[in-house]
Image (spheres, rainbow, N blue to C red):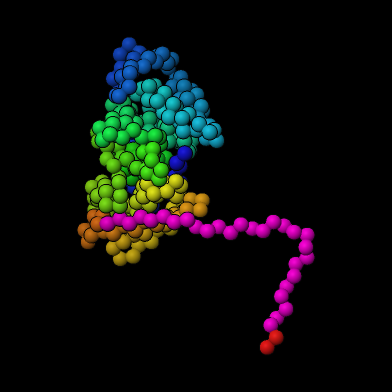
Amino acid sequence: MRIVKWVLAGGLVVGFCGVVCQGQGFRVIRGRPMMRVAPMPPGMEGQQVEMIVNTIQEDAGNAMELRDAAEDKLVVLGDGSIDAMKASMEQHSGLARDALEVALFRMGNGGLDPKALIADWETKRGSKPKTMEHLVAEGMARVFPNHLFFVVDEGKAGERSVIAVAADGKVQLLLDDAALAKFLRDELGDATETHARDNAARAALVLGMARLSDAGRPDVVETKETGDTMTATGMEGSESGTAVVGFDKDGTVKSVAVKTEKVATTIPSPPTDEPATTSAPAVP
C-alpha cells in the first residue's frame, strides 16, 4: 500500500468533469467489458457513492484490492454521480479519497483503464508484471492533473518500475533519473517561481523513492533552494531519500538525482531494576 503524505507548496486545484458513453443502463468502459448499472432514483447518488467508498478498509490485508474494486464501481456509476463523488472526496482521506479521485480522472477521460493499458504495454515488451499499485499521492494529482502513476513489480528480485499513464492513454516508463528529469521538464515547463521548483523537487522525491525503495511513501520533511537547485528530503520508516533537481536559467528542469539510504535506528534497552551507576571522574 503506497500512501504519500504531501502538503503542496503550490499547484493547481483541479476540477473534474466526466463523459462516459451510456445507453439503456449500460456503461461502456474503455478496456473493459460493458457493465450494467441499475438506474438510481433521484437523490440516491450520494448514498450509493458512500456505500461503495465504505467498503475500503485501510487496515485490511487486502486494502489495495478493496480500493481497486471500489474505484471500478465508482466509474460504473457514471457522470450522474460526479457531484456526489466530489462532495465525498471532501469527507475522506487516504485510500478512499484516492479511489474517488482516480475514478473521477477515468470518467473525465472516456472511462480510461490505466491498468489495462500498462498490461498491454508490458506484454508488447515481453514482460508480465507481478503486481501493479497506483501511487497514492494527493499532491501528485494536483501537480500532474493529466497523469496517473503506478509502481510495477516486474517479478524479479529488486526490480520495480514507475510508470506514468496520461489522460490520452500514453504509457511512459520513468526508468531512471534521466527519464524522470525529461518527464518533469516536459510536464512542468518553466519553473521560475520557488513554489514551482519546490513541487518539482517533491515530485522527484516521491517518484524516485517509489522506484528505488520498498518504502516509496516519503513524508517530505524539508525542501531547500540553493542557487539553481532545489533539494527535497524525506523519510519513511528506516529509509531516507534525497532528490536534487537542477534548473536552467529559464526555469526548465535540467537534471534530477535521487538517492535513498537506510538510516540506523537506536533500539532502547529494556527497563531494569538495577540501580543506576555513574562513573567516577578521572584522576588527573
Image label count: 0
Q: Main secondary structure of the magenta part?
A: loop
Q: Which residue is drawn at 64% across and 58% down?
A: 268
Residue farthest top in this picture? 24
Q: Which residue is drawn at 44% across and 46% down?
A: 214
Image spot of residue 185 (x, y percent): 25, 50
Location of residue 40 (image quadrant): top left
Q: Nearer the viewer, residue 205 or 7?
A: 205
Location of residue 31 (image quadrant): top left
Highlighted magenta segment, given as a residue range: 255-282
Image spot of residue 253 (x, y percent): 26, 55
Residue farthest front in this picture? 157
Quadrant the C terminus occupies: bottom right
Apparent side of residue 92 relative to residue 168 in the rendered image (left or right):
right
Residue farthest bottom in this picture? 284
Q: Nearer the viewer, residue 167 or 281?
A: 281
Apparent side of residue 249 relative to residue 216 in the rendered image (left or right):
left
Image spot of residue 114 (x, y percent): 32, 32
Residue 188 forms part of the magenta stretch? no
Q: Residue at x 43, y 29 (%)?
A: 68
Q: Nearer the viewer, residue 259 or 71?
A: 259
Image spot of residue 72 (x, y percent): 40, 25
Residue 105 visible in image: no
Location of residue 111 (image quadrant): top left
Q: In this view, does 206 lie above or below 271?
A: above
Q: Is residue 231 above or below residue 187?
A: below
Residue 268 forms part of the magenta stretch? yes
Q: Which residue is drawn at 48% across and 50% down?
A: 236
Residue 269 visible in image: yes
Apparent side of residue 261 relative to residue 273 in the rendered image (left or right):
left
